[in-house]
Amino acid sequence: MAGVMLGLMAMVVNKMQGHVIDGTLPRPDAGEEASEYELKVRIGDETLEVPMEVSPRMYDENEVNQHFSNVEEKLSDMVRGENESLEQVKTKLQLVTEVDQEGIEIQWFSSDYSLVDTAGVVHNENMQEGEERSCVIKAVLSYGQPESEQYEKQIEYEITVVAPDRTEEEKKKFYVERMLKQANLECDKEGQVQLPEQIDGEEVQYIDQENEIPAEIFPILAVVAVAVLYLGDMADKKRRMDMRARQLRYDYSEVISKLTLLTGAGMTFRRAWEKIVTDYERAGKSTRYVYEEMRNTLYEMKAGISELEAYERFGKRCNVKEYLKLAALLQQNLKKGSKGLGKMLEEEVEDAFDLRKNLAIQQGEEAGTKLLLPMTIMLLVVMMIVMVPALMSFQV
């Protein structure tokens, strides 16, 4: 019983879901698209799969005439497009090929294709103000298939094309263009075109735009160049100052450790200072800003400037916090003596080496940041190398 009931239910469901009902197929309504079916046809013990296309229902003659009337009524408002009327056509006409799923095909013909083409484009760009040209456009309504009965109806619209709306500048340009075309036609057998010297009573000057050099651009470029050079020079100066300050901080630990070592060995600060400068000159290495400033300070002391003032000038020329502190320590030594100075220098050495270590870490991080862009580009290149062959193999 369960099997029989399930079988009956399956038959009912198949019948409800199927398209074939009592040996018939539903036909689409007129104006709709054709329906496609995949049918299983059983002939004896054999089952065949057969595709079938069911065309839409065709109108009868009365329905065709009614739809022709509906289309004609709608076309009368649609054809003019954005124009006020067909007696004053200035812009494109709306020549549609079908109307609201009526199932009616529309073909358009024009009595003057140079004026109005089958797409509805109006060629009135060369018409003068006040000029009018007449034209007849014809709509051919058709319905039916070649293998069955066909119906046709023709509708004609008489239109008047006028010049398009133009601004005052456009009117003047149009007038000048016509004058130049006329000048070209008047001397078409000569080697040169004589351009009119006056247009509408006004003298005319002609400039060939292809050969014209805009003189106004040169002062502007000059001002821009000055600004760019000034900003570039300022940026270069700032870059050099930053590089100088970084080098001074980096060499500070070396300078303070040498001073501490030499003064600890019994030398005075001036003698230790002179020894460091002499060793720098003998080494002949690349320029180091701190040793150059120390040499200038030594020359000042030899020239008669007091040691106290020379150290002060040294700190100001370096203009870095660490060297200002060193100059203050040296001045303190001259004013109050060297009591406790050794311990202060040792503490300063430790701080200087911490500063040098931090600068090294900072430079490493900056180098890593600068490498980020090249590494990203390399990553993209590697991804392209891997992905392009894979995508090409998919296409194959």
Image (tube, rainbow, N blue to C red):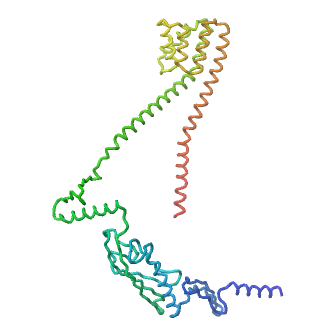
Q: Is residue 361 above or below residue 343?
A: below
Residue appearing at x 30%, y 47% in the figure = 213
Quadrant in the rendering for residue 176: bottom left
**Which is nearer the eye, 214 or 332?**
214
Whether residue 206 is situated above or below residue 61 in the rendered picture: above
Residue 102 drawn at (x, y percent)? 52, 84
Image quarter where the N terminus lies is bottom right
Q: As displayed, is residue 355 above or below residue 153?
A: above
Q: Quadrant of residue 220?
A: top left
Q: How many marks on residues?
A: 0
Q: Residue furthest left?
A: 190
Q: Residue furthest right?
A: 1
- Tell me which residue sits at (34%, 68%) in the image: 125
**Residue beneath the point at 45% across and 89% down:** 146
Q: Which residue: 57% across, 21% down? A: 320
Quadrant of residue 367 within the rendered picture: top right
Q: At which x and y percent is residue 46?
A: 64, 90
Q: Position of residue 160 (x, y in %)?
A: 36, 77
Q: Nearer the viewer, residue 14 or 307?
A: 307
Residue nearest the observer in this picture, 307 or 64: 64
Query: Residue 214, image x and y in percent?
Result: 32, 46
